[in-house]
């Protein structure tokens, strides 16, 4: 009996350990090391005919990983300006690249209709280029750009978010005109012309962009919130806890059964053993 119980306990423990290892192994690809960087961004955008070309580069820092195709998606959010005042095109070396555009409020998402021509491998990057311009009637506002790199299965690899200010074409940093000198008493010091303080440079801050509907009517993995990795680790922890609890319970039961087999209960120790001989009728 004890051997059978321990055999089932060992099988259960091996099953729990195997399930937990499988869950953690499946969750490991979601933590693959990828990085996205954006370049070509000015300190601030100027409205008008000025067109800026910005680039998003994704790289794979894990040398043990394999190669993968990339699909780009750019999320654009505006503040103080309208979406119809912004023009953004996805370009490649041979011209414009086809994209699917979805808008919701002040957020627009431009997703590639096909995979990027390049291939992402260890030591090899994939680059996406965009041309950005703002209408002439823009006076002042802000724009947030988030470059997202997905694999062929629409799994988010990495994301980079930057925010820049947008100013009108006629806005320049100039000094205020010097006031005409006025006669003053000799005891008073001459007044100095007031200079307009230069506005502080805007920090290169990264702000989250509101999520837009996923491209191509397919589910897109998101990095924020309770994701697949957290759920996998939680499930693995629960399975391990369940397995340990069952093993302890089985150990307690087998130990109790063994003690009961070796030492009979106290109430049985006081029982008088039955005589082994025959009963003889009493003689008168």
Image (tube, rainbow, N blue to C red):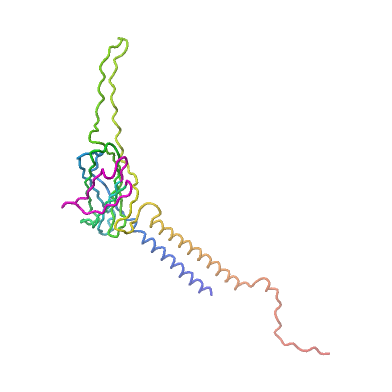
Count up the numbered dots: 0
Asked where in the image residue 261 lies, by quadrant, the reply is bottom right
Name the residue: 22% across, 35% down: 169
Q: Looking at the picture, tell me which residue is in the foreground, 91 or 28.
A: 91
Residue at the far left in the pictured view: 94
Majority secondary structure of magenta residues: strand
Closer-to-camera residue (147/284): 147
Name the residue at 59% across, 70% down: 259
| 69 lies above or below 164 | below
Give residue 251's position: percent from left, percent from top: 53, 67
Question: Residue 150, image x and y in percent?
Answer: 29, 55
**Residue 144 placement (x, y as % from top left):** 30, 44
Near-viewer residue (121 or 227):
227
- Name the image quarter holding residue 19: bottom left
User: Is 214 rendered above or below residue 269?
Assistant: above
- The residue stretch that appears in magenta: 77-106
Taking the view exactly as shown, the residue that stands out farthest to the right is 284
Q: Residue at x 34, y 44 (%)?
A: 207
Magenta stretch contains residue 215: no
Horizontally, is 250 left or right of 91 in the view?
right
Q: Residue at x 51, y 63 (%)?
A: 245
Please identify the quadrant where the C terminus is shown: bottom right
Query: In this rendering, is residue 4 above or below 114?
Result: below
Q: Nearer the viewer, residue 3 or 46?
A: 46
């Amino acid at each position: 009996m004890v051997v059978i119980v321990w055999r089932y306990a060992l099988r259960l423990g091996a099953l729990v350990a195997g399930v937990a290892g499988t869950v953690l192994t499946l969750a490991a690809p979601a933590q693959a090391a990828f990085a996205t960087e954006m370049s070509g961004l000015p300190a601030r955008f100027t409205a008008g005919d000025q067109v800026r070309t910005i680039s998003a580069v994704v790289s794979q820092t894990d040398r043990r990983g394999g190669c993968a195709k990339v699909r780009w998606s750019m999320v654009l959010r505006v503040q103080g300006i309208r979406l119809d005042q912004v023009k953004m095109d996805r370009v490649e070396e041979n011209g414009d690249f086809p994209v699917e555009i979805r808008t919701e409020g002040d957020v627009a998402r431009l997703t590639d209709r096909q995979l990027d021509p390049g291939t992402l491998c260890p030591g090899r990057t994939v680059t996406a280029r965009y041309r950005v311009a703002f209408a002439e009637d823009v006076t002042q506002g802000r724009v947030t750009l988030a470059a997202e790199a997905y694999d062929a299965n629409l799994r988010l690899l990495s994301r980079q978010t930057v925010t820049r200010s947008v100013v009108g074409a006629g806005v320049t940093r100039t000094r205020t005109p010097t006031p005409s000198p006025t006669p003053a008493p000799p005891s008073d010091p001459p007044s100095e012309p007031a200079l307009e303080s230069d506005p502080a440079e805007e920090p290169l801050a990264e702000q989250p962009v509101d999520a837009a509907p996923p491209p191509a009517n397919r589910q897109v993995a998101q990095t924020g919130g309770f994701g697949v990795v957290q759920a996998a680790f939680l499930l693995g922890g629960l399975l391990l806890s369940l397995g340990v609890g069952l093993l302890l319970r089985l150990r307690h039961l087998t130990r109790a059964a063994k003690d009961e087999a070796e030492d009979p209960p106290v109430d049985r120790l006081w029982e008088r053993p039955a005589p082994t001989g025959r009963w003889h009728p009493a003689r008168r």
